[in-house]
Amino acid sequence: MSKTLADLFLDELQDIYDAEHRITKALPKLVKAATSPELQTALQKHLKETEGQITKLEQVFKSIGEPAKATKCDATVGLLEEGDGIAKEFKGSPAINAALISAGQKVEHYEIASYGCLIEWAGLLGHDKAAGLLQQILDQEKGANDKLTELARAGSNEEACGEEESASAGKSSAKKSPARK
Ligand code: FE
Ligand code: ZN
Ligand code: FE
Ligand code: FE
């Protein structure tokens, strides 16, 4: 028998339920790796939100009469592995916060894509309560992503290029001289 949209909705719900659990475990590590207090606060806040998202997803499962179940999200495993790798690689670097922000944003974008689809499908399947709950989560993911963009622009990106700029200060006048045509 061929699979239906209802099957797809449930599959993806189980996938994101797993993802949120993994993200909950990963966020405290990112907080520790961050050296910007503002970034630490933002990640901490999103950890609390993420814990609430797990509860919201359990309400979604309940609203469609299904048991809450997690199936391994390979994408999140990979994104978090990359984030872990980059955190280790940039430990002690002025680019550490920029690196962590980019890792975080990749996760948020994955979540934004997932919840966007789930909301559309919930609507088509007539799961209005589920759609409302999923929309609340999507709004939090978008908020978290926007906050990370803001922090990158407010200092972490500049901080990341700061050392390199002073190291190459002697060469910068040559670099900035008008290009010859
Ligand atoms: Fe989330
Ligand atoms: Zn996933
Ligand atoms: Fe997945
Ligand atoms: Fe998130």
Image (cartoon, grey):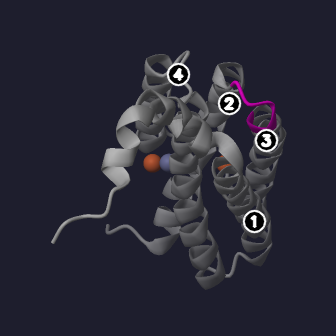
Give the label on residue 42, or none.
Answer: 3
Rendered location of residue 71, percent (x, y): 50, 40
Do the residues under discs 3 and 2 have CB atoms within 8 angstroms?
A: no
Relative to 17, does residue 112 appear above or below in the rendering?
A: below
Q: Which residue is mark 2?
A: 27
Q: Disc 4 or 2, which lies upstream in sequence?
A: 2
Q: Disc 2 or 1, which lies upstream in sequence?
A: 2
Q: Disc 3 or 2, which lies upstream in sequence?
A: 2
Q: Residues within 10 Å of mark 3 (few under 14, many from 20)?
A: some
Say what secondary structure mark 2 lies in: helix
Relative to 36, does residue 142 appear above or below in the rendering?
A: below
- For badge 2, the amino acid type reads Leu
Q: Which residue is mark 1?
A: 139
Q: Residues within 10 Å of mark 4 (few under 14, many from 20)?
A: some
**Range covered by the magenta-colored residues:** 35-39
Quarter occupied by residue 17: top right
176 lies left or right of 119: left
